[in-house]
Image: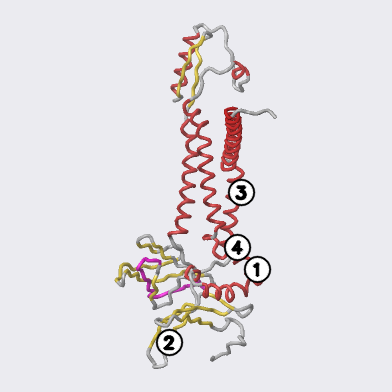
């Protein structure tokens, strides 16, 4: 066997190392290009928009868990079994596993929204090179086949003016129509390029920017903001808004009016807003006419039954005396029972209030019980 010198072995190993490094570099470049094409794909944008639309539709049609309930596993389990399962049955468990009872905070919605933002930014960056060339105007003198194959093409001969004079006439006509004029002299004559409204093409970027800001704002609101559809205040009661706002809302009165034929005429709520226990604002809420204070909006979205509960301990000391909104329903059809809950101060106990089903004789809750 032929003996190789140490210098030869080192050279061969270095050559092999360069080959391996080169292959790895090409592989990484290829993966980067594929990833870039993936994020720049219009098909990806369409799929993500359809996914977000579908999830939004689910969040609108499917009952969503009240925000205050998600923080307590026990309350969430009770809500799922007593409010959702009687209606959805065997679908309750898989839908809960997929997070579809809290769609707008689910990883599917947040992930699709984040990926759509990346897709929009990637498409905008990818298109900038060609758009920049259009804005700058590009080349003036093009190949002969460009002029020969043009859709709007005309040739003139026998003009009683020189090419320079003819060019000046064309330039003046275009300038009167507010075209941008660019000239280039060639051995055959003068080439004229004219365009206008070129900056309108930037409108795509403003559209993309507005869409990105909308999605980012919604995602930030999902993490940092709050929206409570279960915030219900019985008439004459005060409820803390929570979420670190130091706000509380009192419902002074609620009035519902109807036309003689039966359709609703008006729903209005007279409310008082407190901050740190001090009154800061009064307002009259109507449908689609909320009251705002420091970025928090209060909407009138529903009304329903309520009860006044009084709770005392064994010694007779009053622990709770306030209204409880029965804003849910529990039980199986046809016995859909109005349900609400409240916390007994100083005990750590959450009490559930269940009223008899309306419109039916309820065998579990007979009249007078």
Label tally? 4
**Residue bearing mark 2:** 311
Q: CA distance from mark 4 to mark 2?
A: 39 Å
Q: Secondary structure at mark 2?
A: strand
Q: Which residues are magenta?
A: 243-260
Q: Quadrant of residue 315?
A: bottom left
- Considering the whole magenta stretch, tell me its main secondary structure: strand
Marks 1 & 2, CB-CB < 8 Å contact: no
- Say which of 141 and 222 sits in front: 222
- Labels 4, 2: front one: 4
Which structural element holds mark 4? loop
* Gap between marks 3 and 2 measured at Cα: 54 Å
- Are the residues flagged by discs 4 and 2 in contact, CB closer than 8 Å? no
- Report whether 307 appears left or right of 100: left
Q: Are marks 3 and 2 in contact (CB under 8 Å)?
A: no
Residue for badge 4: 98
């Amino acid at each position: 066997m032929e003996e190789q010198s140490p210098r030869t072995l080192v050279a061969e190993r270095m050559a092999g190392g360069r080959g391996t490094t080169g292959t790895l570099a090409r592989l990484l470049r290829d993966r980067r290009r594929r990833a870039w094409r993936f994020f720049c794909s219009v098909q990806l944008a369409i799929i993500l928009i359809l996914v977000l639309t579908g999830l939004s539709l689910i969040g609108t049609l499917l009952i969503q868990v009240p925000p205050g309930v998600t923080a307590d596993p026990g309350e969430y389990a009770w809500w799922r079994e007593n409010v959702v399962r009687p209606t959805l049955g065997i679908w309750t468990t898989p839908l809960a596993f997929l997070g579809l009872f809290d769609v707008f905070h689910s990883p599917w919605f947040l992930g699709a929204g984040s990926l759509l933002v990346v897709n929009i930014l990637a498409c905008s960056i990818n298109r900038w090179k060609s758009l920049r060339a259009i804005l700058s105007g590009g080349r003036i003198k093009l190949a002969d086949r460009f002029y020969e194959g043009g859709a709007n093409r005309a040739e003139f001969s026998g003009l009683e003016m020189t090419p320079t004079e003819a060019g000046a006439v064309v330039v003046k006509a275009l300038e009167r129509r507010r075209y941008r004029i660019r000239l280039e002299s060639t051995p055959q004559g003068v080439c004229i390029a004219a365009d206008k409204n070129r900056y309108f093409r930037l409108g795509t970027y403003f559209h993309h920017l507005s869409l990105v800001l909308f999605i980012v704002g919604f995602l930030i609101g999902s993490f940092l903001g709050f929206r409570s559809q279960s915030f219900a205040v019985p008439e004459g009661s005060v409820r803390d808004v929570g979420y670190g706002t130091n706000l509380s809302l009192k419902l002074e009165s609620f009035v519902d009016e109807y036309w003689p034929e039966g359709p609703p005429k008006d729903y209005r709520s007279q409310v008082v807003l407190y901050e740190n226990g001090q009154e800061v604002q009064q307002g009259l809420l109507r449908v689609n006419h909320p009251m705002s204070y420091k970025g928090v909006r209060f909407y009138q979205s529903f009304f329903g039954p309520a009860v006044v509960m009084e709770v005392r301990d064994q010694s007779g000391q009053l622990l709770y005396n306030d209204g409880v909104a029965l804003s849910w329903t529990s039980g199986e059809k046809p016995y859909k029972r109005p349900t609400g809950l409240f916390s007994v101060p100083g005990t750590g106990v959450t009490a559930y209030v269940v009223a008899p089903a309306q419109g039916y004789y309820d065998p579990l809750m007979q009249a007078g019980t």
